Amino acid sequence: MLITLQHIRAARERIAGKVERTPCVLSQSLSERAGHPVHLKLEHHQTTGAFKLRGASNAVAALSPEEKSRGVVAASTGNHGRALAHAAKLEGMRAVICMSRLVPGNKLDAIRRLGADVRIVGNSQDDAQQEVDRLVAEEGLVMLPPFDHPDIVAGQGTLGLEIMEQVPDAASVLVPLSGGGLASGVAAAVKGVSPGTKVIGVSMARGAAMKASLDAGRPVQVEELPTLADSLGGGIGLDNRLTFGMCRDLLDDVILLAEDEIAAGIRHAYEEEREIVEGAGAVGIGALLAAKASTNGPTVLILSGRNIDMALHRRIVCGEAATATERAA
């Protein structure tokens, strides 16, 4: 099954009024460096601080009344959990979010404030998913996973529609890549409108599950490691039904960044663009600064989230932290 432009347009109608249409602005500093226009899609201005609200809102809205009465559950590295908790609260639904010990405390606190039941399980997304599976089997909750679900992917794809309306001559779009929900949805929307526009996934070098899977030609497991781009952590699922195939077929390239390159993206966003973004939201900027992205025309970078621990952010912009190891210091 693939998500098409028709699915994404239907999702946009379904979530109208529930999510923000975020700005897309020209970056003078990055445009000068690249030699062509570089636009920043400010998705970190979304209501819950990240793009995940699009997919979660669409998936919750598509549930039947009986499913809504049972409540929802998901594994998350933080942003999907926050988005699902927000969407469920608006519907008066129960939400249980399962996360590993690698998820930063600021993200746990934000989810709890929305009234969700937070479960901390193990040291990886795979560990957290085991608790999700148990809750589905024993308590009847409805699982809405962070990426490998048609309604999630279609919801994330609405971001791609906005990009092509705001920058119709875009030659390239750089999108953060983790489990592939955002990347596959955006790529389906962008290429559905403009087949010649390149869509490039950007991830961290430490534990990039989708890149490893694409290289292997099938979903594979990778060790989940601490990284400044913590929202990009976790596997894609060995039984991945949707996003692996879509990323394989629709992405033009995948770029991996070292920790210091992610930190450089965070610093640039703050010092030059006056934007606070988390590591996952800064990878597009980091790729451009490191000259790892081959772009030859108008380019859009998706700043996907802002939910960074502010003490860590201060250390990064002050040059005191540039790696995942230093993050915990």
Image (tube, rainbow, N blue to C red):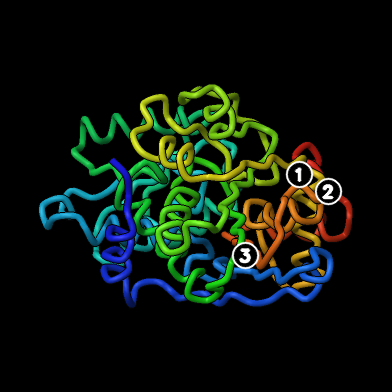
The answer to whether one can see residue 81 in this image is: no
Separation (CA) of disc 3 from disc 1:
29 Å
**Element carrying mark 3:** strand
Separation (CA) of disc 2 from disc 1:
6 Å
> At label 1, which amino acid type do we have?
Arg
**Element carrying mark 2:** loop
The answer to whether one can see residue 41 in this image is: yes
State the image coordinates of residue 269 (x, y, percent, origin top left).
75, 65
Instruction: State left or right for residue 177 relative to residue 250.
Output: right
In the rendered image of this protein, does residue 38 appear above or below residue 17? above
Viewer-proximal residue among 301 and 118: 301
State the image coordinates of residue 299 (x, y, percent, origin top left).
65, 64
> At label 3, which amino acid type do we have?
Val
Q: Residues within 10 Å of mark 3 (few under 14, many from 20)?
A: many
Instruction: State left or right for residue 287 relative to residue 243.
Output: right
Which quadrant is the N terminus positioned in? Answer: top left
**Element carrying mark 1:** helix
Q: Residue at x 24, y 62 (%)?
A: 61
Residue 321's disc number: 2
Write down the residue under mark 3: 300
Instruction: State left or right for residue 84 relative to residue 32.
Output: left
Write down the residue under mark 1: 327
